[in-house]
Image: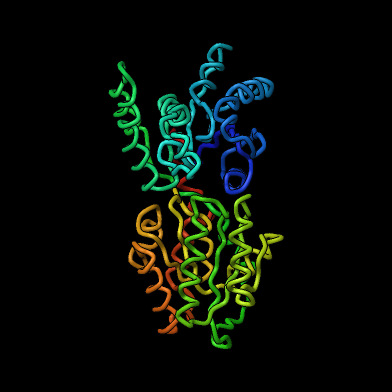
Amino acid sequence: MKAMRMRICLLEPYFGGSHRRWAEGLKAHSRHEIEILDLPARHWKWRMHGAAVSFAGKFADLGETFDLVLANDMMDVAAFAGILARGGRTCRIVTYFHENQLTYPLSERERGRGDRNDLRYGFINYTTALASNLVLFNSDFHREAFLAALPGMLAHFPDFRNSETLEGIEARSRTLHLGMDLGELDRYRNGKDTRDERQKPLILWNHRWEYDKRPERFLDILYALQAKGHAFDVALLGARGPKSRGLLREARERLGPMIVTDSPAESSADYAAWLWRSDILLVTSIQDFFGGSVVEAAYCGSHPVLPRGLAYGEHFGDDALFYSKEEEALERLEYLLLSGAWRQPFAAGRKLARYDWMNCIETYDTVLGSA
C-alpha cells in the first residue's frame, strides 16, 4: 500500500539557526510536500505576537489548499487559527515546540525586573497548545517540564483558570526528537585519528555565548583545571553575544596559547572539522530542551561532561559523565585527562545517529500523516 503524501504548510516565525536547519531538513527529507512560510530570525517577542497576523496574510495569499499546518511555538497559533476561521478557512494544526517561555530560565536582568511575573509569552504557549490538534516536543524532558509548569501558571490568575483544559493538552502531546543532518558531519571526518600523536586533549565550546549556556562557569572550570597543572587546548566556537567580550578578553589573558581557535566557525565545513578534532565537550548550560550542539559534538567523538538534568539523559543514559557541582565537573575532566580515556573517541556518540533525518524521517512522516 502506497504511503499517503500530504501537503503541509510549515510556519517558521524565527527562520534562523537550528530552527531553519530543522525546517529545511524536514522539507528535504519528508515524503510529504512541504511549503515553508518564514519570517526573519529577530525580535522574538514581537514574533510571538505578530507572526500570527503576518502568516495568516501570507497563507491567504497562497490561495492553496493544505492538509496540515505545521507551526512553531514562537507564534500565537490560537490567533492564527482565529484569523483563518474569520476568513472562512480551517485547517488541522500541529505545533512543534523547540522551546517554551514557561520554563526557559530568566537572565539576571530579567529576574531583577521581575519578568517571571509577566506571563504573556507563557500564556501564548498555553493557548497555542490549546488550539493545536497535536503538540510535539523535541524531548521528553521538554514535554514533561512544560506540562508540569502549566498548572502553576494558571494558578496565578484570579478566577476562571480553566484548568480542566490541561488534560486535553497532555493527551494531545507527544515527543518527536529533533531531526538533524548528522550524516553531513561525516563528510568532513578525517580518515586518520591523530589522538595518539597529541600530548594533550582539545576541550570544546560550541554553544551560543549567552547566559543560559553559562560561559563564565565553563571558563572558571578551565581556570581551575589549569591551576592544577593539567595540559590541554581549548577551541572556543559559537555565536558571540554582546556580553561575551569581557569573558573572552579574560580567557585570552589567562589561557593564552592554550586557545587554538577563538571565533565562530566560518563555514559548516570549518565547524565540522573542529568537532572531529575535539576530544572533550564540557557543558555548563542551565537550559537545553534538546541540545543540538551537544549531540553534534558527541556524535563526532567528543567525550561529554554534562550537568545533570535537562535533556541529556535521553541522549546518553549512563554513557556520559554527569556532574551536579563545579567540583564534580573538575573531577570528571581530571579522570578523562589522567586515565587517557580522551585518546579514544566517545564510542556511544555513534548511537546518536538515530537523530539523523535518514533514520527518523519515517517517524516524522507517520506522525504528521496521522495528525
Asked if residue 152 is positioned above or below residue 338 in the image, the reply reads above
Instruction: Please give the name of the residue rendered at 51% of the width and 49% of the height, measured from the top-left corner.
Output: 361
Please tell me whether residue 1 is drawn above or below residue 304 in the rendered image: above
Q: In this view, does 58 lie above or below 39?
A: above
Q: Quadrant of residue 259?
A: bottom right
Judge by depth and name the residue closer to the eye, 307 or 117: 117
Q: Is residue 150 left or right of residue 6?
A: left
Q: Is residue 29 visible?
A: no
- For the C terminus, the image quarter is top left
Residue 186, percent across and down? Answer: 60, 67
Q: Residue drawn 42% across and 78% down?
A: 336
Tell me the residue at 47%/61% (across/down).
217
User: Residue 56 at what x, y percent from top left?
Assistant: 61, 22
Label count reads 0
* Residue in the foreground of this view, choosing between 126 and 42: 42
Q: Nearer the viewer, residue 340 or 164?
A: 340
Whole-percent x, y for residue 26 in the image: 57, 45
